[in-house]
């Protein structure tokens, strides 16, 4: 296969961090090439080098025989390289059309609006999507925003598309659709670099896989030469995968009761509609449902991020719907895909400071009004060790960490609270295998100590593996409960489409 | 192959680079201002030496520099405190005036006796400045009214209110109708040092810097301010009361600016009069920005500003340069400092077009 681009011995350091040590790999025309690696291995950084966002310290990029140097993202775009970032770069207040137009080069000053609209709609239809170009971007789901990023690239006729963890924000259904689109693009002779932590996806779509470990490319394998185990072994190396066991059956004591909870969104529609739920002590309660049926609102209402319109949240008999005590009773962890700034972290503060965001008042971390720096540092060292967080130099802002590592910071913080109730919204999205397993382990251990967990996930495998009970949500209402030991996938699938079990 | 320039975001400048860029920009400003001086028939080198000698070379000059820096340090701190939380207090000017009014009211009408006088004036200035800013704080915290507009507009009210007082009810009956209040009694004046105008206000300013440093870097309150400034959503989620914090921080910011007004009347003017602040509150915004909101930075930048102000004045006297020249000179330096700030975060790169092969 002809080579489109070749990267040789790329090295990129940031102050105090070697993000890429020595990476070589190449991209052929018309292939889907997957990059696999643990959180912080350097995947996003490598892609930023390839798109001219960062200049490498050393190493070279070849196009055919010719050595090329990118001075800025514009140059790589001129070569037909386009990227959908792990964190999107759309203007929320602008419409879809405007966001796409911004990305197009050489749009004449008085551009033929009609013609462009038609062309965009053509692309949208070609891939079987359903989008209205005049909708402002902030109203869209994260999945839809991802499509817009992709359409932007397609409109520019990119030869190489880079997708940095696109499926971390997609529902299983959307993922299917994305894969169909990608296959189509491949047939048109386009090359695609795909990044994902989900083995099943990697197996399904990759022509070749390159594995990054600690900033080095350690292997490139052709389709047929790899299987799930081999990839995992290569990627993990001698790092150990945490082991855990599901705890014993839980007690019948109720620690959280949600009664007729209703939440309206900014469009005035009901995200939660008289929702009821009961959580027992030490229980891991999985919430299954197709994305967009109120899961996010449920997590946000419970953690106090959005206002409750009506209904009650009861904690062991006391009403905490509007009480300040809630924040210490309920902890929340969430995957924050599009916008890390949303709830998870204070991006400009250091790792140490972010880890105590919720319990900075704890006497452990202060003497009177003064913060105890040594205690805060010790706490951070402990958490970095436990959760294998790849931290940058001491004191550097947490926003510089890799996507997965930011996620780990949030998880470490929320679990260190020893909450009575944990609300986990897609907690393992974007985490590498080892880290995902560690999160499961911590949740299971917490359950053993009486913590109740509401685990919201779209991954039925995950729900089956770890939940004691599964509740199904549909259009903001509870459809019913199922026992993962006995209920079949079909049964749960039916409930997810709104069918009430007999 | 054509050449073109391109603006790129820098990843992260090192501390050394930042210092160099800032120092370099001052030299470039001096260079450019040199042409201005030449056109006025003045030898730039001699003029610059003169500025340094006047502002630093004698105990008189040095003391004047510190005197000028005093209100700048205090207001710079006030503004930077609010900036830390992404609250834009443009109203330090008005808060200085209100602080001065508060202090004056105590000085003239309280009838207090010596040892209590200065603390009482301090408290009055602190409260007056704080109350003034708290209006904007309340509007912002409660009804999301933009604090920039409110604080800015309240400046005009504060200045006119001061004018009303000095032209009207507080006018010195024996003052031949000048818009001045009566002179303060000795108890209401700061001590002065070394036979110069250097007064305790300067040490008060340094104390404020230290206190603010401790507040921001060491206490749980400073921690909350930084967290809210970085991401209000996350802070609220973590159980911080962001509305209350906005209100308190704006109020405290105004209260600190009020101290500057107290220091000016107690240390320098010894009375309240029209125009006690020639725009310190606005300069403070630039200072806070250049200092990157750090307390130590505010002190350093304010001292530099002090040198500029004193040195600029001396040029007028020695070479009969017009006042406008001093302003142009300060403007140039600020312009290049701000430009260097841009180059610290971005780089301009000359690139050969990468040809699409
Ligand atoms: N701008 C930056 N400044 C400092 N350090 C950085 C910067 N960008 C990345 N890093 C560091 O480089 C390392 C690699 O980060 P990168 O984002 O490439 O990881 P990744 O493989 O994409 O991980 P993930 O799967 O979590 O997204 C991390 O340790 C990260 O902290
Ligand atoms: Mg990444």
Image: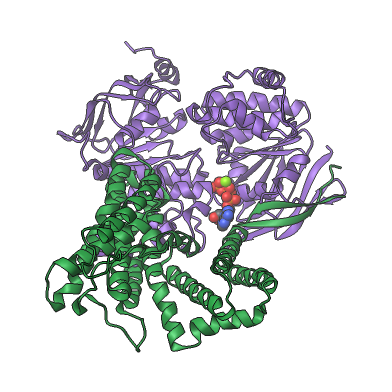
Q: Is residue A8 left or right of residue B224?
A: right
Establish if A223 lies above or below B133: above
* Spot occupied by residue A301 in the image (x, y as percentages of width and height): 31, 32
Which one is in front, B137 or A335? B137
Q: Which chain is purple?
A: A
* Spot occupied by residue B84 in the image (x, y as percentages of width and height): 40, 56
Establish if B107 lies above or below A298: below
Quadrant including the C terminus of chain B? top right
The quarter of the picture where residue A214 lies is bottom right
Q: What residue is shown at x 36% (from left), y 70% (from top)?
A: B209
Which one is in front, B269 or A21? B269
Q: What residue is shown at x 41% (from left), y 68% (from top)?
A: B72
Q: Which chain is green?
A: B
Colouring method of the image? by chain
* Spot occupied by residue B176 in the image (x, y as percentages of width and height): 27, 68
Can residue B210 be seen by looking at this rendering? yes
Which one is in front, A136 or A445? A136
Which one is in front, A243 or A386? A386
Q: What residue is shown at x 36% (from left), y 58% (from top)?
A: B92
């Amino acid at each position: 296969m002809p080579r489109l681009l070749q990267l040789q011995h790329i090295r990129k350091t940031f102050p105090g961090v070697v993000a890429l040590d020595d990476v070589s790999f190449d991209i052929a025309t018309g292939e889907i090439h997957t990059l696999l690696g643990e959180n912080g291995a350097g995947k996003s950084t490598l892609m930023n080098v390839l798109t001219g966002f960062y200049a490498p310290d050393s190493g070279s990029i070849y196009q055919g025989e010719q050595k090329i140097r990118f001075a800025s993202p514009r140059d790589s775009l001129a070569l037909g390289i386009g990227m959908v970032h792990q964190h999107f770069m759309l203007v929320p207040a602008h419409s879809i059309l405007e966001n796409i137009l911004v990305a197009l080069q050489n749009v004449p000053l008085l551009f033929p609006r009609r013609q462009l609209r038609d062309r965009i709609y053509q692309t949208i239809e070609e891939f079987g999507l359903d989008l209205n170009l005049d909708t402002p971007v902030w109203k869209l789901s994260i999945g839809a925003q991802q499509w817009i990023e992709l359409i932007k690239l397609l409109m520019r006729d990119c030869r190489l598309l880079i997708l940095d963890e696109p499926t971390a924000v997609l529902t299983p259904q959307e993922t299917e659709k994305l894969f169909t689109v990608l296959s189509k693009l491949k047939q048109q002779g386009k090359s695609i670099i795909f990044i994902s932590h989900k083995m099943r996806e990697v197996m399904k779509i990759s022509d070749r896989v390159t594995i990054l470990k600690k900033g080095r490319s350690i292997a490139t394998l052709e389709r047929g030469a790899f299987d799930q185990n081999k990839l995992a072994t290569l990627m993990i190396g001698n790092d150990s995968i945490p082991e855990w066991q599901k705890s014993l059956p839980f007690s019948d004591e109720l620690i959280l009761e949600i009664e007729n909870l209703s939440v309206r969104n900014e469009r005035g529609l009901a995200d939660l509609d008289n929702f009821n739920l009961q959580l027992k002590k030490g229980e891991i309660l999985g919430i299954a449902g197709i994305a967009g049926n109120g899961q996010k609102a449920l997590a946000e209402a419970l953690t106090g991020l959005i206002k409750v319109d009506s209904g009650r949240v009861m904690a062991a008999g006391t009403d905490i719907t509007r009480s300040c005590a809630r924040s210490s009773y309920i902890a929340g962890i969430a995957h924050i895909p599009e916008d890390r700034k949303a709830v998870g972290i204070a991006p400009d503060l250091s790792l140490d400071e972010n880890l105590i965001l919720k319990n900075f008042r704890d006497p452990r971390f202060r003497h009177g009004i003064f913060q105890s720096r040594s205690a805060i540092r010790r706490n951070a060292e402990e958490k970095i060790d436990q959760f294998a967080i790849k931290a940058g130099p001491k004191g550097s802002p947490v926003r510089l960490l890799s996507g997965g590592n930011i996620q780990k910071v949030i998880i470490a913080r929320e679990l260190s609270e020893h909450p009575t109730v944990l609300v986990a919204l897609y907690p393992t999205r974007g985490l590498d295998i080892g880290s995902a397993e560690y999160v499961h382990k911590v949740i299971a251990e917490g359950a053993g100590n009486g913590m109740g967990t509401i685990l919201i996930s779209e991954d039925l495998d995950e729900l089956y593996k770890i939940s004691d009970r599964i509740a199904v949500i549909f259009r903001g209402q509870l459809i019913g409960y199922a026992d993962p030991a006995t209920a079949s996938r079909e049964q749960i699938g039916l409930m997810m489409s709104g069918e009430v079990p007999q | 192959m054509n050449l073109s320039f391109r603006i790129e975001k820098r990843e992260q400048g090192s501390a050394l680079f930042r210092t160099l860029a800032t120092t370099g920009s001052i030299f470039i400003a001096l260079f450019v201002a040199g042409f201005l001086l030449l056109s006025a028939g003045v030898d730039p080198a001699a003029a610059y030496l003169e500025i340094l000698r006047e502002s630093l070379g004698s105990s008189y000059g040095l003391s004047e520099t510190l005197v000028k820096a005093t209100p700048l340090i205090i207001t710079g701190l006030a503004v930077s405190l609010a900036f830390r939380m992404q609250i834009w207090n443009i109203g330090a000017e008005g808060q200085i005036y209100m602080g001065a009014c508060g202090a004056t009211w105590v000085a003239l009408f309280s009838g207090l006796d010596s040892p209590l006088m200065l603390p009482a004036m301090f408290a009055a200035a602190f409260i007056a400045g704080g109350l003034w800013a708290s209006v904007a704080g309340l509007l912002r915290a409660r009804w999301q009214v933009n604090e920039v507009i409110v604080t800015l507009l309240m400046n005009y009210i504060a200045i006119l209110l001061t004018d009303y007082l000095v032209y009207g009810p507080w006018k010195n009956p024996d003052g031949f109708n000048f818009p001045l209040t009566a002179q303060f009694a000795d108890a209401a004046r700061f001590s002065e040092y070394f036979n110069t105008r250097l007064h305790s206000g300067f040490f008060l300013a340094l104390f404020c810097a230290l206190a603010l440093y401790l507040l921001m870097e060491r206490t749980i309150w400073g921690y909350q301010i930084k967290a809210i400034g970085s991401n209000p959503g996350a802070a609220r989620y973590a159980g911080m009361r962001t509305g209350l914090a906005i209100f308190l921080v704006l109020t405290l910011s105004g209260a600190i600016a009020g101290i500057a007004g107290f220091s000016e009347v107690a240390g320098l003017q010894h009375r309240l009069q029209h125009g006690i602040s020639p725009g310190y509150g606005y300069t403070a915004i630039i200072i806070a920005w250049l200092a990157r909101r750090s307390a130590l930075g505010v002190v350093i930048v304010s001292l530099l500003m002090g040198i500029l102000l004193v040195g600029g004045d001396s040029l007028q006297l020695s070479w009969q340069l017009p006042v406008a020249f001093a302003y142009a000179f300060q403007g140039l330096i600020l312009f290049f400092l701000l430009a260097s700030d841009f180059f610290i975060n971005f780089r301009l790169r000359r690139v050969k077009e990468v040809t699409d092969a």
